[in-house]
Amino acid sequence: MMEHLTRRGEPKILAECTLPLTGSVQRIITDLAVLDVTSEGLVLAETAPGIDVERVLAATGAPVHVPA
């Protein structure tokens, strides 16, 4: 599990990768949420206990689809 934000409070999950690509991922698990990586973009699978959807959206540097 990784931390969702940097030490400076900036999002680690961005709309575009800024580093060389070495592989692909299907799921991102952080201290705030579980996000599925799909061809349409990020989809919120679940939030961590005590974390609301708004906090995850604010902490993510890319659009996140929230299922109904």
Image (cartoon, rainbow, N blue to C red):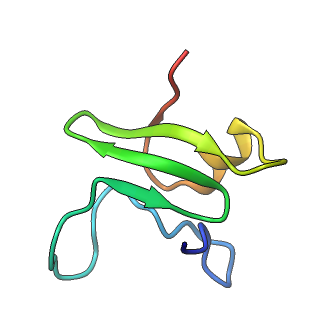
Left or right, residue 24 beside residue 65: left
x 25%, y 81%: residue:
19
Locate residue 62, reporting x and y percent.
43, 49
Which quarter shows the C terminus? top right
Which quarter shows the N terminus? bottom right
x 84%, y 48%: residue:
50
x 15%, y 72%: residue:
23
Left or right, residue 54 beside residue 45: right
Viewer-side residue, 18 vs 24? 24
Left or right, residue 20 beside residue 4: left
Q: Quadrant of residue 63?
A: top left
Q: Quadrant of residue 17?
A: bottom left
Locate residue 9, reporting x and y percent.
68, 73
Left or right, residue 2 beside residue 65: right
Residue 4 drawn above or below residue 36: below
Viewer-side residue, 36 vs 18? 36
Locate residue 42, reporting x and y percent.
38, 42
Locate residue 8, reporting x and y percent.
68, 82
x 43%, y 59%: residue:
28
